[in-house]
Amino acid sequence: MLDTLKFFIFVLLLLITILLNQNVTSKKSGERDISQFWRIENENGTLKIENQTIPSGIYSALEQALIIESVLDFKNDLTTKWIARDNWTYSVPLTCNIKELNFTNVVLTLHGVDTFSKVYLNEELLGETSNMFVRYRYNVKNALRNECKNSPELRIQIRSPVSEASLLASQYDQLKIVPECPPPRYNGECHVNMIRKMQASFAWDWGLAVPSMGLWKPVRLEYYDSAKIRDITFALFDEETHWRMLVGVYLESGTTKRKLQGTLMFKILGVQLENEIVNVSKNSDESGELFVEHTLKVNKTSVELWWPNGYGRQKLYNLYVKWEDNAINNVQLHYRETLIDEKVIRIGFRTIQLSQERTSDGLMFYFIVNSVPMFMKGSNWIPSSVLPESSYDENYVKFLLYAARDANMNMLRVWGGGVYESDYFYQLADELGILIWHDMMFACSMYPANEAFLNSVKVEVIQNVRRIQYHPSIAIWATNNENEVALRQNWYGTNVNEDVYIEEYKKLYVSVIQPRIAKVDKWRAILISSPSNGDQSTKEGYISKNPQDPLYGDVHYYNYIHDGWNPVIYRGGRFISEYGFQSFPALTSWPVRDLRNEELTDLIEHRQHSPLGNVPILHMIDENLPMPSNESTDYWRDIIYLSQISQAMIVKTETEVYRSKRIEHGTMGALYWQLNDVWIAPSWSSIEYGGKYKILQYWIKDVFAQSHVIAYINAMNKLDVYLVRDTLGSDEVWTVEVNIHQWDKFMRVDNLTFHSIKVPENTVVRIGTYDIYDHLRQKNMDPKEHLLLINLLRDGTKIAENFVLLKKIKTATQIADPSPRPPLGSRAPHWWPHYSWPRLS
């Protein structure tokens, strides 16, 4: 009887519990994406665009509404200049959700406003924005609750960046911030260096002026009771049998100071960690931010290493971090999730070191990854779109990064005139093994050093380094692009007040940016500038006498005077982080209504922003190739194709010289300028805007191959032959065949073979110098009618091939025009003489 009564009471209590909780749902913290139903209008209300989705920019929105044609078409960069001179307001109705408003913290987070704005909730000013690279947060709980009856509206009034830049320049009471305007040929806007916005958006030598405005990153309403994990940083240190992991967790407890008490838990699935839990009891700062640093240990045998492309797998691990507030034990079950937050990052176990040991004549400059010295092969990355919101196009970013991976690149340099890229960009770089040389977003200019500017930069650097620091792909930071060399070489007339400009330079980069990177990131090298002399620049007070000294640091090298097909002109350096040559995009890529010479000539001239115009391109064609008549109806078809041949040949030659100089000059990196483009225009890119490969992109795959044979005519007019092996492992035995061909024959007419060459891992072997012209004389062969085709064999199998031109192509008399020509978009063969004069159409 007693047991029956106990069972009845248990069932009754259970039913009561169910009845009491049947209308109670679990309260869970989270965020609401405010991405739809935005309205955009200009200042006088004459233009209105409804139902816009975030991310958004004004140029994209106007095009989608059919108010303008694409700014990338025709000469629309000129006809749309009015857009950036107007002011634009983004507005959206905010629904009141009582469940959200019941949380302790209800925070409006603007991840990216471009650029100057006032943010309102109905008529209440929440705050202002002035830096497109900064995340802004506003606690809107009370404001939103008060406005619930009045149909709350979020309104972001964005001001003209052109006008703001001009205003700031006029108000700056110190030295002029130079250059004040870009060269007239750019058709750009002035004073971009006064504002924290994509520097290339006011025009560059490869890009158009599109000073966009908008919400280029997400807008979200975040709600939680305890704290939110915003960022996680990660550093790795080698301790013989273990990895010591230094994990930093950045928590936000709303937007005001508050004491947090709770627990952080760390987990890597399938991997045993030491010290997985840390107790937290500390106050956040005045903005609600709190930093917790914790050390974890993992046995080395429990994890695999992450390797750059070409050296091994890119093994990544999910690091789970969970925050639990101590109050979790004092609340009902359905409230507990309000006191919890979780975040996952993908980490890689790898070490990276920038080695600058002293030599007899200078300092080395190379990267050691997982104890392996590596030659860095790659290119420079500019924004995937001149419209910032389009940088979120994951398909296009994926296409470009896969193109880099497939071309045997192991490094890209994120250039300092663009943007800090999307999370997806870095995630994909991690997956593909592409190391990132990362500039801060300062390029080719002097910058203000007043308090307001420096304070904005502090926040910008801290936020962005925290966001992306954990990625194993990031190899090094540089605080600016070319500003040291610009200052030292007086690019902008700074020698008149040089001491003051140097003082402001150091204030910005040495006193503000560098220490803030170092505080967040404890395991990467930081360069003050690129190019620079590295440690030697630091020794000389951060402004070297010659920041382009080839015996130190990194070098940017462009030569438009001498014959770029001639390998002798390339002096080399420790690390060449920029070099290249221009070409034209394919004929059918040009946005013209017809391809008659007059219209195309006009558009090409308009879009050629290089101060030298088309002269270097045409000069190199004329120097080495048969020059088409400018009276020909096919003039541009021929010139475009020949420009791509010339560009490919120049970059191939220069890159191979740098790869060969690893043993003689300690050259350990070659990053050509540039991988991608932002519009169809003459530029240095190997991939056109939209994704069409230029010939260079096909060739560079072979030039950057893990196993390669390099041969060229040296300054003594003799043939140098080098073997390049980037792979790891035991010694290999290779054979080199040097085949002599006539231009009008596919069969070889003579042959030289070098047998049984031992090639160790990860090195370059110079197999010798040969007087090839004496050999030809003995065989009664005319150099201008012959070329060398070189095969590299391992165990009788060809693993690489190359070619050497013995005289300029234009002097050869036996080259025929083959037929039929390959179709548009067909792959260029590995050595271009095979297809002589087919044309890109």
Image (cartoon, rainbow, N blue to C red):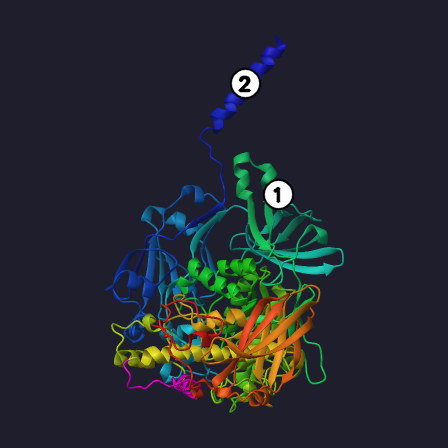
Q: Single out the residue that lies furthest toward the right.
A: 240
Q: Residue furthest top?
A: 1
Foreground: 176 or 632?
A: 632
Q: Residue at x 29, y 64 (%)?
A: 63
* Percent position of residue 501, x then y: 53, 84
Tell me the magenta residue range.
Answer: 613-633
Secondary structure of the residue carrying numbered label 2: helix
* Proximity of marks 1 and 2: CB atoms separated by less than 8 Å: no
In the image, residue 733 sits, relative to residue 98, either above or below, namely below
Residue labelled with disc 1: 326
Residue 732 appears left or right of 596:
right
Determine crowd level at label 1: few under 14, some 14-19, many 20+ residues with C-alpha closer than 10 A.
Answer: some
Magenta span includes 625: yes
Mark 2 is on which residue type? Val
Q: Amino acid at mark 1?
A: Asn
Q: Quadrant of the N terminus?
A: top right
Q: Nearer the viewer, mark 1 or mark 2?
A: 2
Q: Quadrant of residue 80?
A: bottom left
442 or 768, which lies in front? 768
How much space separates mark 1 and mark 2, taking CA atoms?
32 Å
Binning the other alpha carbons within 10 Å of mark 2 as few (below 14), some (14 to 19) or many (20 upward) gives few
Residue 760: image location, x then y, percent: 70, 69
The numbered dot on residue 174 is none
Disc sitting over residue 11 in the figure: 2
Seen at 32% across and 71% down, the residue is: 588
Q: What is the quadrant of residue 810 in the picture?
A: bottom left
Q: Is residue 145 left or right of residue 336?
A: left
- Among the 4 quarters of the image, the one containing residue 361: bottom right
Q: Nearer the viewer, residue 280 or 595?
A: 595
Residue 828 visible, this angle: yes
